[in-house]
C-alpha cells in the first residue's frame, strides 16, 4: 500500500481540522490529559464504579464530561482557518469552561432536587458552546443553533403555527443549560453515554490498522473485476464508514487511497470523487455501528439500538447494490479493466493477517443483538481488540501507540461532542415553547390532509435543513414536527417514518448546491466540485427513492409483517438494475443502452420497483419491452460490425 500525501487542511470540514501540532507538542499532551480524564470519568459512570462508596450522579457526570471535552475543543479546534497556534484567549476559554462545569457538577444534586441555577455562569457556558458550534460546524451550523436557540425570546411574536410560549432570557438560559430539556437531556446522554464506547472502539480499530485491512480485503475480493478500484472504494468505505460514523473522516481516510487508484485505471476525476462521496455517505447508516444519528433515532423513538441496526440492513444493502451496479455499468460501457494481478493482494494472506478485526466485529454484533449490551458491547470489544493487537508486532499496543490511540480517540470524541452538545439549545427551544405540536398540525393543514403533499413538504424541509451541514440537527427538528404529522395522516410505521427523515436529511451532503461531502472528495480528486456533486447525486440515486419504498412497505425495514418481502424485494432489486442501466447506459447481462432508451428504462425501473401492485405491473411490462429492445439492439451490433 503506497502512502499518500496528507489532505490539505483548507479542503477539510471545520470539525475535521485540528491544531494539535506534533504528536508530543504541549497542546497534544494537554489534549491527551483532558481526553484521558474524560474517558476515565465516562468508564466510571457507565460501569457504575464507586468512589468512597458513592456513584456519580447523572448530572455530575454530564457536567464533568461537558467541561473536559469543551476544554479539549478549545485546545484542538482552530478559531479560524489556518490557525496553527493556540492563543491565550482559547486557553482562558478552556479553563473557564472546565472550572464552571466542575463547579456545576458539585451542585448536580441541588439542580435536580431544588432547581438550583446560576444564570450568569450558565450564560457563559451558553456563549462558549455557541463558539464550539461555530468551530465544529462552521457559520451555517452556528446560525441554526443560535437562531433556533433564541426562538423562545420571540415565540409570542411569530405568526400562525410558529407562535409559541415566550420566555425571558434568564428562564431561557435556565432551560437550555440546567434542565433536562437542554444540556442535561438527550443530546448529552447520546454523546456521553450511548456513543462514547463506539467512538473509543472506532479509534482503536483505526489505530490498529482496520482501515488498511478493509481496503486490502476489498481489493482481494473486487480488484480483479472491471472497474475494480471503484468497487473497492464502495466496499471499503461501507465498512470504514460504519465503524467511524463520520462521512468526512471516511472520505479523508479511504478516499486518499482509493481516489488516486480509480483515476489511475481510467475513471475521470469527478467520477472517482463522486463514487467515494456516495460510498462514504452510505456508511453512516450501514450496520453494525453506523453514525451518531442512529443512536439519536433510537432514543427519540424509544426503541433499542438493536432495532434500529436491524432496520437499517436492507436499505443500506440496496443502496450499495445500486452503487456497485452503476460503477460496473460505467466500467463496462467505457471498457475499464480491473487491477493488474500483481497489484491484488492474496485474500488468504489478508484474512490471516486481519482475522482479529473480523472476530471483533462478529463479537460486537453478537453483543448488540444477542446479549443486548447496547451500552457495554463496544467497551468489551475494545478490550478484545487491544488483547488481540498483541498477537502481531506491528499492531501491538506499545506505550507510544497507546498514546497515539488515545489522541485519536480524543479527537473523535471531541469533534462529535462539539457537534452534538450545542444541539441541546435547539431541542430545548422547540420543547419549552410548545411549537412542535403547532408545526405538526400546521403541516397537516398545509398538506390538506393528503399524505403525499405532507411528504413533499417533508422532503423539502429535510433538504433545506440538511444544507446547514448537520443531518442530526435536521433530524431532531423534523422528528418532533414532521414525523407526528406523517404518522397521524398516513398511519405509517414509526421506525419507517424516522428512517425516511434520516435518509433525506443526510442526502444534502452529496446534493447541490451544498454537497459538502462531494466537495471534499472533489478536492482530493482534483475535480470540479459542482460537477462531482451532480455526479454523486446520480450515482446515489437509490438512496433518493428507497426511503419512499420502505415508508409505504415497512417490511423493508423489517417491521410488521415480513411476508411482502417475498415479492417486494425481488421487484426492487430488478428495478434498481434497470435504473442503474438507464442512468449509466449499460444494462447488466444485456448490453449497451442507446441514449434515447436510457431515461425510459430508468423510469420504468422506478415504477417496477415501487411497492404498489398497479405501478409494479405497468412498470414490469414496460421494462420487459425496453429490455427486449436493448437485447435486440445489442445482437444487431456485432452483425452490423461484421458487414462493415
Image (cartoon, rainbow, N blue to C red):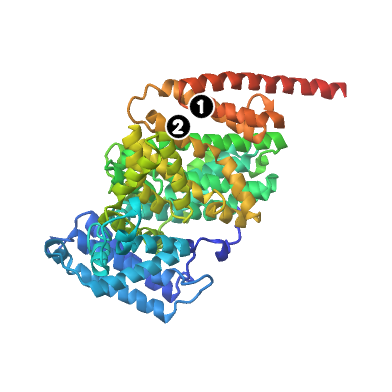
Which residue is at the front of the view, 263 or 330?
A: 330
Could you tell me which quadrant the C terminus lies in? top right
Q: Nearer the viewer, residue 461 or 126?
A: 461
The residue at which mark 1 appears reads as 609
Image-quadrant location for residue 219:
top right
Residue drawn where x is 87% and y is 21% of the image: 643
Q: CA distance from mark 2 to mark 1?
A: 8 Å
Give the image location of residue 52, x and y in percent: 13, 65
Q: How many marks?
A: 2
Figure check: 5 above or below 273: below
Q: Secondary structure at mark 2?
A: helix
In percent of the image, x 65 and y 39: which residue is there?
Answer: 227
- Residue 427, given in percent of the width and then of the height, sits at 31, 55
The one of 324 and 296 positioned closer to us in this rendering? 296
Nearest to N terminus: mark 2 or mark 1: 2
Residue 175 position, x and y percent, is 24, 62
Q: Residues within 10 Å of mark 1 (few under 14, many from 20)?
A: many
Tag 2 near tag 1, CB within 8 Å: yes
Amino acid at each position: 500500500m503506497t502512502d499518500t500525501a496528507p489532505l490539505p487542511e483548507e479542503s477539510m470540514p471545520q470539525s475535521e481540522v485540528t491544531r494539535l501540532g506534533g504528536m508530543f507538542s504541549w497542546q497534544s499532551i494537554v489534549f491527551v490529559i483532558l481526553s484521558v480524564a474524560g474517558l476515565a470519568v465516562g468508564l466510571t459512570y457507565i460501569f457504575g464504579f464507586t468512589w468512597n462508596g458513592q456513584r456519580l450522579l447523572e448530572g455530575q457526570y454530564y457536567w464533568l464530561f461537558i467541561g473536559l471535552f469543551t476544554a479539549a475543543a478549545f485546545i484542538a479546534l482552530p478559531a479560524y482557518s489556518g490557525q496553527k497556534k493556540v492563543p491565550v484567549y482559547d486557553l482562558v476559554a478552556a479553563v473557564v469552561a472546565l472550572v464552571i462545569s466542575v463547579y456545576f457538577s458539585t451542585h448536580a444534586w441541588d439542580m435536580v432536587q431544588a432547581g438550583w441555577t446560576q444564570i450568569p455562569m450558565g450564560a457563559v457556558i451558553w456563549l462558549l458552546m455557541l463558539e464550539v458550534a461555530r468551530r465544529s460546524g462552521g457559520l451555517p451550523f452556528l446560525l441554526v443553533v443560535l437562531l433556533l436557540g433564541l426562538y423562545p425570546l420571540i415565540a409570542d411574536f411569530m405568526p400562525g403555527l410558529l407562535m409559541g410560549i415566550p420566555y425571558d432570557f434568564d428562564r431561557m438560559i435556565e432551560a437550555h443549560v440546567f434542565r433536562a430539556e437542554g444540556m442535561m437531556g438527550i443530546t448529552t446522554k447520546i454523546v456521553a453515554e450511548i456513543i462514547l464506547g463506539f467512538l473509543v472502539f472506532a479509534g482503536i480499530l483505526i489505530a490498529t490498522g482496520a482501515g488498511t485491512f478493509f481496503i486490502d480485503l476489498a481489493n482481494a475480493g473486487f480488484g480483479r473485476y472491471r472497474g475494480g478500484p471503484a468497487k473497492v472504494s464502495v466496499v471499503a468505505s461501507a465498512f470504514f464508514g460504519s465503524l467511524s460514523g463520520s462521512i468526512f473522516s471516511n472520505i479523508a481516510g479511504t478516499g486518499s487511497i482509493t481516489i488516486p487508484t480509480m483515476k489511475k485505471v481510467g475513471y475521470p476525476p469527478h467520477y472517482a470523487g463522486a463514487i467515494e462521496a456516495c460510498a462514504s455517505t452510505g456508511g453512516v447508516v450501514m450496520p453494525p455501528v453506523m453514525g451518531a444519528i442512529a443512536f439519536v433515532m433510537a432514543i427519540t423513538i424509544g426503541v433499542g439500538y438493536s432495532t434500529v441496526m436491524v432496520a437499517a440492513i436492507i436499505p443500506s444493502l440496496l443502496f450499495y447494490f445500486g452503487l456497485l451496479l452503476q460503477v460496473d455499468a460505467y466500467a463496462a460501457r467505457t471498457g475499464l479493466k480491473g487491477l493488474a494481478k500483481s497489484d491484488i493482494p492474496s485474500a488468504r494472506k489478508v484474512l490471516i493477517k486481519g482475522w482479529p478485526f473480523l472476530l471483533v466485529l462478529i463479537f460486537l454484533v453478537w453483543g448488540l443483538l444477542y446479549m443486548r449490551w447496547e451500552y457495554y458491547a463496544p467497551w468489551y470489544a475494545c478490550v478484545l481488540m487491544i488483547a488481540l493487537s498483541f498477537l502481531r508486532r506491528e499492531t501491538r499496543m506499545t506505550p507510544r501507540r497507546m498514546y497515539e490511540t488515545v489522541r485519536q480517540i480524543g479527537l473523535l470524541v471531541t469533534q462529535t461532542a462539539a457537534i452534538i452538545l450545542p444541539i441541546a439549545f435547539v431541542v430545548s427551544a422547540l420543547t419549552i415553547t410548545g411549537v412542535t405540536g403547532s408545526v405538526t398540525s400546521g403541516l397537516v393543514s398545509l398538506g390538506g390532509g393528503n399524505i403525499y403533499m405532507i411528504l413533499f413538504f417533508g422532503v423539502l424541509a429535510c433538504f433545506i435543513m440538511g444544507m446547514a451541514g448537520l443531518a442530526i440537527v435536521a433530524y431532531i427538528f423534523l422528528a418532533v414536527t414532521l414525523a407526528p404529522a406523517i404518522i397521524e395522516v398516513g398511519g405509517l410505521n414509526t421506525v419507517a417514518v424516522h428512517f425516511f427523515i434520516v435518509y433525506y436529511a443526510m442526502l444534502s451532503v452529496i446534493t447541490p448546491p451544498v454537497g459538502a461531502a462531494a466537495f471534499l472528495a472533489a478536492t482530493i480528486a482534483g475535480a470540479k466540485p459542482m460537477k462531482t456533486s451532480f455526479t454523486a447525486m446520480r450515482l446515489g440515486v437509490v438512496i433518493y427513492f428507497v426511503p419512499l419504498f420502505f415508508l409505504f412497505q415497512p417490511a423493508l425495514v423489517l417491521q410488521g409483517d415480513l411476508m411482502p418481502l417475498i415479492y417486494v424485494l425481488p421487484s426492487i432489486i430488478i428495478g434498481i438494475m434497470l435504473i442503474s442501466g438507464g442512468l449509466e447506459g449499460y444494462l447488466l447481462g444485456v448490453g449497451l443502452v442507446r441514449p434515447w432508451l436510457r431515461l425510459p428504462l430508468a423510469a420504468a425501473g422506478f415504477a417496477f420497483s415501487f411497492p404498489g401492485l398497479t405501478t409494479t405491473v405497468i412498470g414490469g411490462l414496460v421494462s420487459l419491452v425496453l429490455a427486449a429492445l436493448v437485447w435486440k439492439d445489442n445482437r444487431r451490433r456485432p452483425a452490423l460490425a461484421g458487414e462493415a
